[in-house]
Image (cartoon, coloured by chain):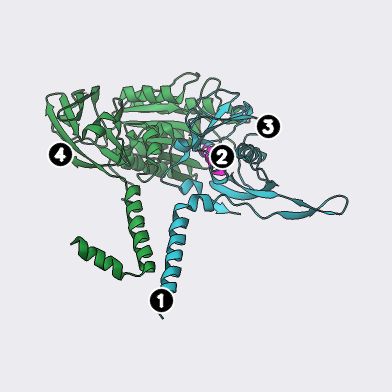
Chain colours: A green, B cyan
Amino acid sequence: MLQNLIHIWKMYSNVKKVILIIIISLISTVSLFAEEKSNVSLRFSRHENNIRIVLESDKYTIANADTISTLSNIKIAFPSRFLLEKQEGFFFDMMEVGRFLIIDLEDISDVKVYKLSTPPRLVIDLTSSGNPMLKGGQPALKTNVVDALTIDAGHGGYDYGIVSDRTKEKDLSLKLARDLGRALSGKGKKVFFTRNVDRASSIDSRIKFSYGKRADIFVSIHSSFTGKCRIYISSTNDMDADAIVTLYRQSSRQNRYIEKSRDLAYNIGESIKKGLEVDVVLKELPLPILNSMDTPAVLIEYPSPQYHEYNKKTRAAFVAAIMEGIAAYENGITAYEK
Amino acid sequence: MKSKKNLIWLLLLILSIGVISMYFMRDKIFQPRGKPDAVITAENGLPVFEDFSYLRIYYPDEDGLRMVEKKIPKRTKQIALAEAVIEEFFKGNEDSRGTNIPKDVKFLGLYKDDENILYIDLSDELRRNFQGDALSEYLILKGIYESLISNLRDFNDFKILVDGKEIETLGGHFYLKYKLKSTVITAYEDSSRLSDE
């Protein structure tokens, strides 16, 4: 065998030998660049309100896996890219981005993560808050019932927002938020305000407050700099983006509600267009307050007071238009139906 | 005949190595562009050779960003280039419409950490003089990020400080306490339509 190979080798000219050596070297170099993927298997089990997720892999992968856990998601950074084998019927949303695995949680009141050996595995113990939607084993999205809302008046305190003539954005937004809250309460809705007085409130504290209330929708009220009314929904995450960027994005909670948010924005936009006769623009923007909401969420920018007069009558018209939009959303009118 | 064939093989080999090398070295070959030296005339009438480079600055313009090339004296150090980018951005662009770039923002300093994150320290006028809505704020942050990333190659990300401190937000809509990339990168670029001047 060896002699045959030596014979073939001798038959080759020097140039061909050089080519052969280079080709072999290139092939072996390319293989060095290829990153080996580790196999990760995901199993889960459920007993009453306790859920156990087990991620099993080789010793190196488990030992070097870093985990960041919150009540809304678990981010696991493996040392290399991986191939995930998932047990059928796993009910949490997941994202695999490069070497990161992100598990979105819902209705969880406690998270514990620990590593075990033989076999090497990462164990995640979750305690469900007992939401009946999870008990069937399949989390269902809320229907368009709006019994409770969170209203967020933009800016406040030392943060004036846009100042035009004698109007401060923080004041007008608060007035509109209060008017809207009163009108909705009159209809039997439960209303939560991120602020109902003139005080400064950070984006983080607004998110925390809203997250705790678990309302059916979230409406943030701000001013536009133009004569147009703009309604924003969150930009969903780019799955192809750099993994680190995706991992550290404020949150991906809104991803699962994005279509509902789009419907809500569409319905409110249509009502404002008719009721106030102003141009309405629907846009997607990676606003942290929207990205972090675990409920359908919109940010409404009313037309700037420089272009639109705001008195008791016009404020009432604006509030009536938003309410009409919410009612249409409750009736299940989607952005694609009209 | 045989040597001719060998010669062809050799040429093909050299070509292949060249192509493969270019692939692996593409980051070093295609650096941010600089234009060739320009000849200008000094006050005394004699021609003077001076190096220029062109910065790509992304200015907010209506509902998107507009890229404008700005000619500056050549700077070789990346930190100096970053300073020039920030200064040019805050000078604004007279042709841009509906821009809300805050006025009188002073550049206070630049710092680089071990992870190649560039910290840009600006004066409080950045926050105090900002008058705009969510889109205006987004376009300012996106414009700064795009301008820096398209001219500098040594940094992984950028972070803005105000008077040497980390603040939560510029105008109440977007975080400033995180690095710029995670704040402005999104799958949907509808709102940041890029158009070349």
> Cβ–Cβ below 8 Å for labels 1 and 2?
no
Residue B24's label in the rendered image is none
- Is residue B173 or residue A306 the one in the foreground? B173
Residue B5's label in the rendered image is 1
Q: Is residue B143 magenta?
A: yes
Q: Position of residue B71 (x, y in %)?
A: 68, 49
Is circle 1 on the same chain as circle 3?
yes
What residue sits right under mark 3 in the picture? B104
How far separated are the C-alphas under marks 2 and 4?
45 Å
How far separated are the C-alphas under marks 1 and 3?
70 Å
Identity, as a three-letter code, of the amino acid under mark 1: Lys
Q: How many marks?
A: 4
Callout 4 crowding tier (Cα within 10 Å): few <14, some 14–19, many ≥20: few
> Cβ–Cβ below 8 Å for labels 2 and 3?
no
- The local secondary structure at tag 3 comes to loop
* Magenta stretch in the rendered image: B138-148
Q: Is residue A269 left or right of residue A223?
A: left
Seen at 42% across and 65% down, the residue is B13
Seen at 26% across and 43% down, the residue is A37
Callout 3 crowding tier (Cα within 10 Å): few <14, some 14–19, many ≥20: few
- Is residue B14 or residue A293 the one in the foreground? B14
- The local secondary structure at tag 4 comes to loop
Q: Position of residue B97 (x, y in %)?
A: 62, 46
How far separated are the C-alphas under marks 1 and 2?
56 Å
Q: Position of residue A43 (x, y in %)?
A: 15, 34
Q: Is residue B51 above or below residue A57?
A: below
- The local secondary structure at tag 1 comes to helix
Identity, as a three-letter code, of the amino acid under mark 3: Asp
What residue sits right under mark 4 in the picture? A87
- Is residue A105 or residue A31 the one in the foreground? A31
Seen at 65% across and 54% down, the residue is B35
How far separated are the C-alphas under marks 4 and 1?
58 Å
